[in-house]
Amino acid sequence: MNVIVVIFGVLLGLSAGYWGRYRFPIVRRGSRLDERLGQLNLVCIASQGLVALALAFSSNMAGIPALAFAASGLLLGSVPLYFAKRKDPRLAGAHGQGSHVNEERTLSMTSRWPHSVVYTVGYVSLFAYIVSLGLTSR
């Protein structure tokens, strides 16, 4: 197994630890710990973008290297999008006018969905490249 694929797996595991942050009641949205976990996730995603490039070059451009380059660009390009909060498209029909006061109303109306979409497409591209490596090595 390629060492770079193992490094990718470790970094993916670290990012997956951030994805599950809302399962734990001690981490509130917008808290200091939430922001630190977000920064750790950004470092992991940027590192995975660099790993995608290294994987393409270390495999002597085997498989479909355009997938690795696309994955690298998407993963690295998603990092600046982390700071852009947009209105959540799932709430397009919701007006958010209720009788109860919600302290996190502004947090719940916006999300970092552009960042999530871009790095998810980057992950799919990187997985496709890893699969293409396996198919061409036979």
Image: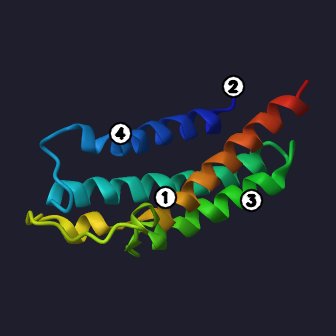
Q: Which residue is mark 2?
A: 1
Q: Earlier in the sequence, mark 2 or mark 4?
A: 2
Real-space Cα separation, disc 1 to disc 2, in angstroms: 29 Å
- Judge whether 61 appears above or below 4 on screen: below
Q: Residues within 10 Å of mark 2 (few under 14, many from 20)?
A: few
The kind of secondary structure element at disc 2 is loop
Real-space Cα separation, disc 2 to disc 4, in angstroms: 24 Å
Q: Which residue is mark 3?
A: 69
Q: Residues within 10 Å of mark 4 (few under 14, many from 20)?
A: few
In this rendering, position of residue 37 left or right of residue 113: left
Q: Which circle, 4 or 1, is nearer the viewer?
A: 1
Q: Which circle, 2 or 4, is nearer the viewer?
A: 4
In this rendering, position of residue 27 left or right of residue 41: left
The reply to whether discs 3 and 2 touch (Cβ–Cβ < 8 Å) is: no
Q: Earlier in the sequence, mark 4 or mark 1?
A: 4
At label 3, which amino acid type do we have?
Phe
Q: Which circle, 3 or 2, is nearer the viewer?
A: 3
Residue occupying image coordinates x 74% and y 42%: 128
Q: Earlier in the sequence, mark 1 or mark 2?
A: 2
> Which dot marks residue 116?
1
Across and down, in percent, residue 35 comes to 24, 61
- Judge whether 88 appears above or below 62 on screen: below
At label 1, which amino acid type do we have?
Ser
At label 4, which amino acid type do we have?
Gly
- Judge whether 125 appears above or below 136 on screen: below
Across and down, in percent, residue 49 comes to 59, 56
Which residue occupies the foreground of this view, 98 or 124? Answer: 98
